[in-house]
């Protein structure tokens, strides 16, 4: 497999790798590749930083109390209101 084919093959697995969902064997293969491939290290570092920034800047939207009360009333869940 040429370097570019190897890169392409492994880059398809990056999301699973970053999420911790990649099999142990593929994880080792990807890490060996990353040790030798600067381009792929840049890609994965950028992906990790993007995810980190997204998680830091996105807060759960706060639902106004009156909207929440009306929603719970409509769904007949008034007993679950705080």
Image (cartoon, rainbow, N blue to C red):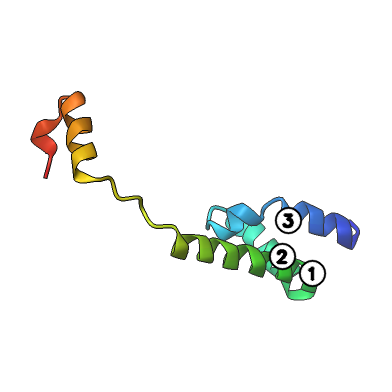
Compared with residue 1, is residue 44 higher up or lower down, i.e. above or below? below
Quarter of the image for the C terminus: give it: top left
Percent x, y for residue 70?
19, 32
Residue at the spot of label 1: 39
* Number of numbered tags placed on the structure image: 3
Residue 57 vs residue 63: left or right?
Answer: right
Residue at the spot of label 3: 11
Question: What's the distance in space between the residues labelled 3 and 2, CA to CA?
Answer: 9 Å
Pick the front one: 3 or 72: 72
Residue drawn at (72%, 70%) of the image: 42
Question: What's the distance in space between the residues labelled 1 and 2, CA to CA?
Answer: 6 Å
Which quarter of the figure has residue 78?
A: top left
| Secondary structure of residue under mark 2 | helix
- The crowd level at tag 3 (other Cα within 10 Å; few <14, some 14-19, many 20+) is some
| Secondary structure of residue under mark 3 | helix
The numbered mark, 3 or 2, whose residue comes first in the sequence reads: 3
- The crowd level at tag 1 (other Cα within 10 Å; few <14, some 14-19, many 20+) is few
Residue 11 vs residue 27: left or right?
Answer: right
**Dot label at residue 43:** 2
| Secondary structure of residue under mark 1 | helix
> Does residue 25 appear anywhere in the picture?
yes
Residue drawn at (87%, 59%) of the image: 4
Question: What's the distance in space between the residues labelled 1 and 3, CA to CA?
Answer: 11 Å
Compared with residue 63, is residue 55 higher up or lower down, i.e. above or below? below
């Amino acid at each position: 497999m040429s370097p570019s084919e190897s890169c392409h093959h492994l880059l398809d697995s990056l999301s699973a790798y970053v999420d911790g969902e990649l099999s142990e064997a593929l994880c080792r293969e990807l890490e060996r590749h990353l040790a030798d491939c600067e381009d792929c290290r840049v890609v994965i570092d950028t992906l990790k930083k993007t995810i980190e920034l997204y998680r830091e800047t996105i807060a759960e939207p706060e639902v106004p109390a009156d909207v929440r009360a009306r929603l719970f009333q409509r769904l007949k869940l008034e007993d679950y209101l705080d």
